[in-house]
Amino acid sequence: MVHKLITLPMFPLNTVIIPGEVRTLHVFEDKYQELVADCIANQANFGIPYIKGGQISEYGVEVSITKILQQYPDGEIDIEIKGIQPFKIIKYTKILKPKLYGAANIEEYEEDVASNRYKLFRSFKQFIKQAKNQEIPLENLTNVSVYKVAHLLDLTNDEKLQLIAFDNLKEKEDFLIAKIKLYTHALKLEKELRSNFRMN
């Protein structure tokens, strides 16, 4: 895992975006309109740390702007963004004068997330079959990253935050396997309850 220290403008959100995930943002606050305009002009990325209860997490994900979807007369803008890689905040500056927005010194790490552990994908495939989710083609689940599995599992924000905070691939894989086991057990209980209800 390669670590590097850089500075990124920050756009705190009450959601966690993981690497590879694509989202749309409607940007309406002046400071973030300025941030987005600067990133577009300089072909630069920005960071999204998770904010909950007014507190900014020390972890987040660098994102790139992939599309400008719509610009409005009042300066508001809709953009499409994609998660790139996680980071840990070393120092956060709420307002980076003379700019309106904040920035942070971060430690960013380039990860090897292409899991080769058969156990993870076997567990996930079994879960998908049990859930009878026809939207996820099983043949596409070979040699994909742990973040692809995480996205398909539809983790909560807190679970995503836990995932990106782990230091190595094995911890991420073990975390996902444990979640899959938990979801599989919940599905089994739900089916048993439905079966018992029909019998009564």
Image: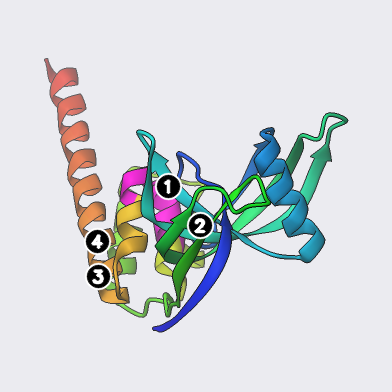
Residue beneath the point at 34% across and 67% down: 121
Residue beneath the point at 82% across and 39% down: 70
**Which is more foreground, mark 1 or mark 2?**
1
Q: Which residues are magenta?
A: 148-159
**Which is more foreground, mark 1 or mark 3?**
1
Say whether disc 1 or disc 3 marks the residue closer to the N-terminus: 1
Residue 194 lies, in percent from the top left, at 21, 25
Between the C-alphas of marks 4 and 3, the distance is 6 Å
Between the C-alphas of marks 1 and 2, the distance is 31 Å
Say whether disc 4 or disc 1 marks the residue closer to the N-terminus: 1
Residue beneath the point at 46% across and 51% down: 49
Task: Report if the CB atoms under discs 4 and 3 are less than 8 Å apart.
Answer: yes
Q: Which residue is mark 4?
A: 175
Q: How many marks?
A: 4
Q: Residues within 10 Å of mark 4 (few under 14, many from 20)?
A: some
Say whether disc 1 or disc 2 marks the residue closer to the N-terminus: 1
- The numbered mark at residue 50 is 1
Residue 95 lies, in percent from the top left, at 56, 48
Q: Camera-side residue: 173 or 69? A: 69
Q: Which residue is mark 3?
A: 171
Residue beneath the point at 43% across and 63% down: 147
Say whether disc 2 or disc 4 marks the residue closer to the N-terminus: 2
Amino acid on which the number 3 mark rests in the picture: Glu
Main structural element of the magenta stretch: helix, strand or loop?
helix
Between the C-alphas of marks 1 and 3, the distance is 21 Å
Q: Which residue is mark 2?
A: 137
Amino acid on which the number 2 mark rests in the picture: Pro
Amino acid on which the number 1 mark rests in the picture: Tyr
Amino acid on which the number 4 mark rests in the picture: Phe
